[in-house]
Amino acid sequence: QNGVHPSVMNTFTSSMRMNKSTVSAVPKQTALHEIFKIDEKLKYSQLLADYHKSSTNFKTSSTISETPQQRKVWTQSLSNTTPKSVSSPRLVETIDLTGEEKKRTRIKVKPYQSTVISSDEDEVKILEEMPITRVNSLEKKLSHNCLVSPQWIIEMQQKYSEKERESLRQVEEEKLKKELYAKHNQSRRLEALDARIRNHLKITDIVLDDTEDEQALVELTPEMNEKIKAALRPNPPSEVLVEGFGQRLTRNDIQTLNRLNWLNDEVINFYLNLIMERSKQDKNMAVYAFNTFFYPKLISQGYNSLKRWTKKVDIFDKEFLLVPIHLGIHWCMATVDFRDRTIRYYNSMESENNTCLYALLNYLNEESLDKKKKEYDISDWKTENVKDIPQQMNGSDCGVFSCMFAEYLSRNAKITFSQKDMPYFRRKMVYEILAKRLLQ
């Protein structure tokens, strides 16, 4: 209307009717793909452009005006609210605007089956229905992603199935090896046990002396026990009970040998001097014993602080050196054996002390350089933390153990004592100090 050709108007109204019929037929949805329809918007924009273009062209003088009768017929056809079909052919008039002379042509057009609906505002007629194809952009995007491809999943399953089979094969192989090794080890253990039994049951002509390992302890006579008992009386504590080797031992010093008291430096030094005195007798090896202050000074201040201590002694003329080791609250004994060129460490608590062994080995070289003005060959010397020796079973007998190590080793006796002998050794040491001689 308003000078617009009916054919153009029909095209515009058909799009409007399609939209309205879609709204009427489909329930309202709030999904984004239902709200935003870019293709439909583009078509609508093109339709508006065509409408404005047609509207401009048909306002020219060549525009055919509708008669009131034609207008009435067209309006009545659009006013029907119930759908109806147009079955009879109708004439459509077209105008050729390209030539100089505008020509009008009437052609016969097959009727188009359409429906007419009415609304409160406009009445439109659907001349053409354009289906809108929905596009699932996520599906399209994922279709090119290999991670969701069925083939990729199959390949991954095959890959890790092969790894799983290989792992299971390795597990089975290790189980088989374990069984073979277990059988082999069991057979070897049985063979070793059989050999031990055969060796144990073997008849030999060798007769072993069971008394060889055990050494009888010197029995303390009643007279000895009386002297020991008198010396262990606590009072008066400052009374001097014995003098010798430049020392004076009081009753208080002897008390360190009573019960479970800790031995002090005076008692240990006096006892080591008794061992050196015994070594001076015939058929005994030459022994020299350092006092209890030697090792702490060697470790803390070095060789120069005590090189004058052996000014009157040539330690290289001795066969055996005794070095008492004081570790703050614990006593141990170290020996230097020139006969087999070995330095050994004896500890009744079983721990090792390589620092002590290396310090004594270095001391030999320093002493040779100072006294003999030449290096001492220590290339073939050995060091040893002695194992399988008696161990104390309390926290107070370490001093007695150390003195007994020195006493046994200085006369080449096998160490056979144990913790149960410590009370006896304490009383024996009291008597030996009072008598200033060893009983063995």
Image (tube, rainbow, N blue to C red):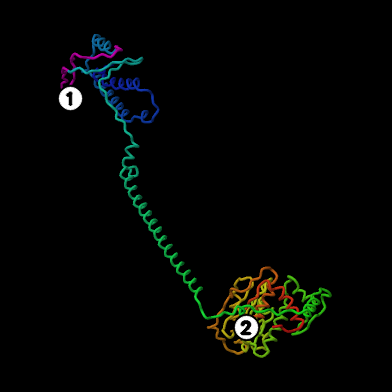
Q: Quadrant of the C terminus?
A: bottom right
Dot 2 and dot 1 residues touching (CB under 8 Å) = no
Q: Earlier in the sequence, mark 2 or mark 1?
A: 1
Q: Considering depth in this image, is 179 or 309 the residue closer to the camera?
A: 179
Comparing 53 with 349, the one in front is 349
Disc assigned to residue 350: none
Q: Please tell me in which quadrant of the rendered image residue 20 appears.
A: top left
- Residue at the image point whose x is 74% and y is 74% from the top: 257
Residue 85 among magenta residues: yes
Asked whether residue 82 is in view, the answer is yes
| Above-or-below relation of 143 to 77 | below
Q: Is residue 372 magenta?
A: no
Query: Where residue 161 appears, x then y in whole percent?
Result: 35, 50
Say what amino acid the circle numbered 2 marks: Asn
The quadrant in which residue 276 appears is bottom right
Which stretch appears magenta?
A: 79-108
In percent of width and height, residue 265 lies at 72, 77
Q: Position of residue 315 (x, y in %)?
A: 63, 87
Drawn side of residue 117 relative to residue 359, left or right: left
**Badge 2 is on which residue?**
412
Q: Which mark is residue 98?
A: 1
* Apparent side of residue 206 relative to residue 71 in the rendered image (left or right): right
